[in-house]
Amino acid sequence: MGLPKKGNRQKMTFMTRIFQKAMTGRTTANGGGPSLDTMLATFDKELDNFPTLMQPAPESKPRTPFDSKNVPREKMSMANMTPKQMLSALPVMLPLMMQMRRCSKLYDGTFQPTRAEADAAFMAELESMARAAGAADIAYVKVPNNAIFRDKGVPCQYAVIFTVEMDKENMSSAPSYDAFKEVATGYKNLAVIGNKLARFMRSNGFAAYPGTALGGLTDYVYLAELAGLGAIGYHGLLITPDEGARLRINTIYTNITNLPIETENEHLWVRDFCAMCKKCVRQCPVDAIFDQPRPRGDGGMQSIDHGACRDYFNQNFGCAVCLAVCPFSQVGYDAVHERFKGNPSAPQFRIPRYGIEAARPIDDRDAELAGHG
């Protein structure tokens, strides 16, 4: 085929730099690609603005990295997008990054809440606003310390959890550019909704710190199951009645002490089905999904070999095969539930509800211990 003409090479270089800027807010002069982990670390620095934070538990796991050290840049799908794909992605990626940065700016440590209890009218308006902005569902949780990622922290012990749905047709094509763009659109919508709701909550006197949609300070899937929105499947994704596994999750940390928190979860039968189905296990292109989830030491279960998953993920537009083939994504929650006759021999995995430690200052010893977990 030969080398591209000089003009085309210059156009590709220009487009690549613009796309890098959209992804991370910077360009890389040394030829390296955009780093989501670097961008998220920049957002996390905003936590330095708080004298006290709610701390992770000693057994808390670290946030799973996005970057693949084993995959050269030239093999990553993000480095091999066509100019047409880049142009198509920019209207999604630019607002996503802008909204995530807006979220991070709310962690400047200056807001002082004037209220800590919300009445029914406020909660109804909050939920109505969330759904009007595109949220598929919304629930509430008291954040346990073991849901906070190692060496991170959160400014409030309560959280609003909300989800957005992703298009079935686009996700069914995974791994593909269309599926990647649909996932990015989901993250963008989460960031927009998070900013909108947080500012509304603050205007009514409540503390509100939206998650960054992509990444975050806590295990969103864990929190969503605790909140009763659904159950975590064997692929490690949340499964809900309306979206199956075709969803993304975000949080808003708040000081509202009387949130209508659910204490029961009617969706835990999902894992009994997973123990029998295992379609995601069989269909994973790199066998990264364990045949059965394994205890990971923090009260949760690990379903994925993150290293194997991450390398394929970065070379194949974020993969998402497990999400696409999941029966809950394809035929739907109600249809699966209606046909499922039970599985009494299924292993019973229940996420415990741990107590919450009081917020305390972060000192040098905390930082030292966090770096050697």
Image (spheres, rainbow, N blue to C red):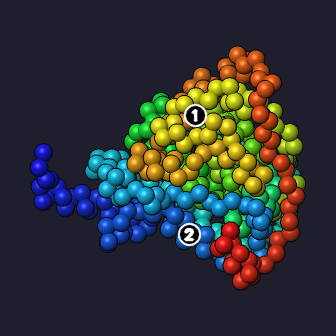
Q: How far across and how far down the image is residue 135, in percent?
A: 64, 43
For disc 2, the marked residue is 41
Location of mark 1 (residue): 281
Side of 76 where 116 appears, left or right:
right
Secondary structure at badge 1 equals helix
Q: Count of labels shown?
A: 2
State the residue in front, 62 or 55: 62
Residue 358 occupies quadrant: bottom right
User: x, y (%) of residue 321?
Assistant: 50, 36
Name the residue: 50% across, 44% down: 183
Callout 2: SS: helix
Residue at figure coordinates x 73%, y 37% from the top left: 230
Considering only order in the chain, which callout, 2 or 1, is on the residue closer to the N terminus? 2
Amino acid carrying label 1: it is Val
| Viewer-proximal residue among 1 and 208 | 1
Viewer-nearest of labels 1 and 2? 1
Q: Relative to 71, say whether 162 is above or below.
A: above
Q: Quadrant of the C terminus?
A: bottom right
The residue sitting at 59% across, 50% down in the picture is: 190
Q: Can you tell which quarter of the image residue 195 is in?
A: bottom right
Q: Position of residue 335 (x, y in %)?
A: 67, 19
Q: Quadrant of residue 354 in the image?
A: bottom right
